[in-house]
Amino acid sequence: MIDLTTAGGLRGAVASEWTKLRSLRSTWWCLVSGAALLGLSALTLGGGTATSLLNDGVRGVTLPAGESVISAVTFAQFAFVTVAMLAVTGEYASGGIRMTLQATPVRGHVLAAKALVLVPVMLVAGVLSGSAAAVAVYLFLSVPPFGGYGALPPAETTIDMLSVGVFLVLVSLMTLGVGTAMRSAAGTLTTAFLLLMGLPLMLAMTGVGPLVSLSLRMPMFAGLAFMDSSDNLTGGPMPYGRVEGLLWLLGWTAVALAAGHAVLRRRDAS
């Protein structure tokens, strides 16, 4: 039976992980950097699309600000997932993982506690930074020479920003699992980049049917499908919708966390 009340139980582990995460200066730097990168990327993408429309003489259309944010989160995600990476690799680098495992002997509790702390942090960070970026894009596209292109439909934007938050939660948990398995910041960052962007793009660029199909089921494109992006970088529509995209993301996250849990249980803390 899981003990939720003692210091070595799950509740105590969650409290400890929350204290560690919020006390690290790197946590706040990464979140602020992620919000700034998301905003700047969204403004760049939104402005670029509006400029193309202006040059083509297209009038009478609107650009939902949320769409620019969804496209931008593909790049900004790495600032956010760094929080998840440092939550585990930082402890291995400093040796603090030994104290963590002494305080919480059930190793599964350690990984679960880190995950439970990351979920609300990343959800709130994603929704708030995404919303700020969407408002910035809307205001930017509402002034000359872009006046008339900006749109911020409340219901659609709300769904978009919640989707961004959920996406960041899942890729952060994915990175947490990878970091627990790899134990080093360099290895985790490299693997996370390949998993979240590098490998899907390389496979898609081959033009080989089975490899392209595989790339479309990897976290990057699955996330774009889940967030209902019209810009999937493949030049065509996604072969599946939101629900399947979410299922692929959940599957990748589960595999990463399972791998991290297996390594955490079987190897010592060195």
Image (cartoon, grey):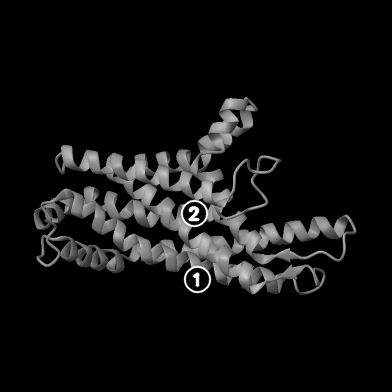
Q: Tell me which residue sits at (77%, 65%) in the image.
A: 62
Query: Which of the two discs, 2 and 1, labels the residue nearer the N terminus?
Result: 2
Establish if 16 lies above or below 260. below
Q: Which mark is residue 128?
A: 1
Residue 146 occupies quadrant: bottom right
Question: Residue 157: x and y, percent?
Answer: 61, 68
Can residue 151 be seen in the rendering of this structure? yes
Question: Residue 172: x and y, percent?
Answer: 40, 53
Classify the position of the C terminus by image quarter.
top left
Measured in 3D between alpha carbons, the distance from the residue under mark 2 to the one under mark 1, in whole angstroms, is: 14 Å
Q: Tell me which residue sits at (90%, 59%) in the image.
A: 57
Which amino acid, by three-letter code, is at mark 1? Answer: Leu
Is label 1 in a helix, a strand or a loop? Answer: helix
Which amino acid, by three-letter code, is at mark 2? Answer: Gln
- Which one is nearer the viewer's eye here, 262 or 190? 262
Classify the position of the N terminus by image quarter.
bottom left
Q: Which mark is residue 77?
A: 2
Can residue 183 be seen in the rendering of this structure? no
Is label 2 in a helix, a strand or a loop? Answer: helix
Question: Residue 68: x and y, percent?
Answer: 65, 60
Q: Tell me which residue sits at (49%, 54%) in the image.
A: 77
